Image (cartoon, rainbow, N blue to C red):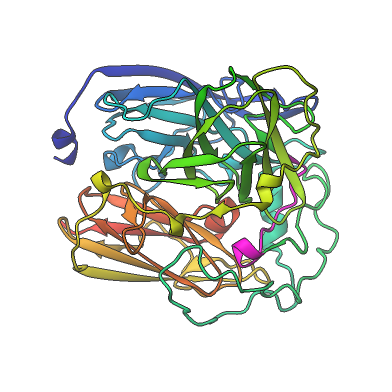
Amino acid sequence: AAERKRGAGPVRKVALTATPDRLDLGGRTVNSWSYGGELPGKEVRVTAGDTLALTLANHLPQATSLHWHGLALRNDMDGVPDLTQRPIPAGASFTYRFAVTHPGTYWFHPHSGVQQDRGLYAPLIVEDPKEPLAYDKEWVVVLDDWLDGVDGSTPDAVLAELRKGMGGGHGGMDMGEGDDGKGMGGMDHGAHGMGGRMPSSGGTSRPGGPPRMLMGATSKWLGGDAGDVDYPYHLVNGRAADDPQTFRAAPGDRIRIRFVNAGGDTAYRVALGGHTMTVTHTDGFPVEHAGTDALLLGMGERYDVLVTAGDGVFPLTAVAEGKKRSGLALLRTGGGAAPGPATRPKELDGRLLTADRLKAAEAVRTSARRPDRTLALDLTGSMAAYDWAIDKKPYTPSQRHPVKAGERVRLSFRNRTTMWHPMHLHGHTFALPGGGPRKDTTIVLPGRTVSVDFDADNPGLWMIHCHNVYHSESGMMTVLGYRR
């Protein structure tokens, strides 16, 4: 019934194959999995109002699925194995068919184990038939942290290493609420819980590769501990920093850049050297335009910006926040030597815009309404035991947090851990407090509470989870369920 209301527009057919492949990261070739041998997978572009019919052929050695990150779509197409569909077995295929109603920058990836931390991801761009922005060129920029196939590493081996835990006293519980309603406020945390981090004992042996557990990664913007995994590469559009992609334009061109963080365990701080960025959208929804030098993207988040291109060659640098590495792409509008992989434009240390400082554009602002229901979700667990969960209960598909169609629902994410978590809701967008932006993924800092509101207008069973792939796979997921 919800799908019928969305209507059925022109059908856009796409064929996609998931296969094991050798992928060129720019001077380094690795064995991994991908969509059609491309990294990222080939962009899918539709227009709002279209019906997408995408057939995924699974040539992988294990079952898989496709989740359409950020889309409000029919529940049986959401791509969560054992919840909204049966896993797609090796050698089989499945057609995802659904109405695409809202323009914006989205992406798709598996929801099967830690497959997303291989090469299985691609952008999904939904064009607005009444596009209000004026620009000359468009640049889709997908950020990713990479270890699959490097010196024998695999995401599954990394998960096994992490699950052994840190030992010692890393990451206590019950830090108190500190409820300011802001996902990114309060930059006075210091480095929570770093004192107890112990070196991993021996790590994993090949073919699992060298130890990948990361020690001492800290960021004030993330409230302390920045991440768990030491990735050897950080990619921009599938390319390592020493062989970057070059985007070409003319001086004075107005360029729309669509940023997607497809990483597994890394937040990225991004800046374009010599330019200021005007933020126009986050997670597909328009915001009141805001200028900034740099942006911070948690895993799963997207931002659209406009820049007016200068004359020359400029670095687009994506710093792996707290991890002392970075990715690179280049904007070239004229002559000159290209900046090298170690370049750090001054804009990275300039104004940093975070989601709590944005306001939703008037057209997409939610109406003022008291919540009919509040769901308090405690984010729990520690690095020591690697027992990430919601309400101390690791995920099972039978979990239900009940809502009813038509309700205004408040989700109160209470982070009881000493790590940040990018929390993602399937099938809906929520509003950050105080007229804040419409989003589907929000950063929740250590010890903080973030309360977001959404309208229950899309019946089904919907995941709520941390978009750190290792946290979610360890148990930090649960299910929102509509009562009949």
Q: Left or right: 296 with respect to 383?
A: left
Let me know if residue 266 appears in the view. Answer: yes
Asked where in the image residue 420 lies, by quadrant, the reply is: bottom right
Q: Residue at x 16, y 55 (%)?
A: 405
| Residue 351 picture location, percent across and down | 59, 53
| Residue 390 picture location, percent across and down | 46, 67
Viewer-nearest residue: 154 or 285: 285
Q: Left or right: 215 with respect to 393?
A: right
Asked where in the image residue 201 lies, by quadrant, the reply is: bottom right
Magenta includes 384?
no
| Residue 261 picture location, percent across and down | 55, 42
Magenta includes 231?
yes
Q: Residue at x 13, y 40 (%)?
A: 1
Q: Residue at x 65, y 65 (%)?
A: 220
The image shows residue 313, relative to residue 230, as above or below, that is: above
Q: Residue at x 28, y 30 (%)?
A: 98
| Residue 298 picture location, percent across and down | 55, 51
Let me know if residue 300 appears in the view. Answer: no
**Residues in magenta, as a range:** 220-233
For the image shown, how many numbered marks are present on the structure? 0
Q: Quadrant of the C terminus?
A: bottom left
The image shows residue 49, relative to residue 405, as above or below, that is: above
Give the residue furthest to the right. Answer: 202
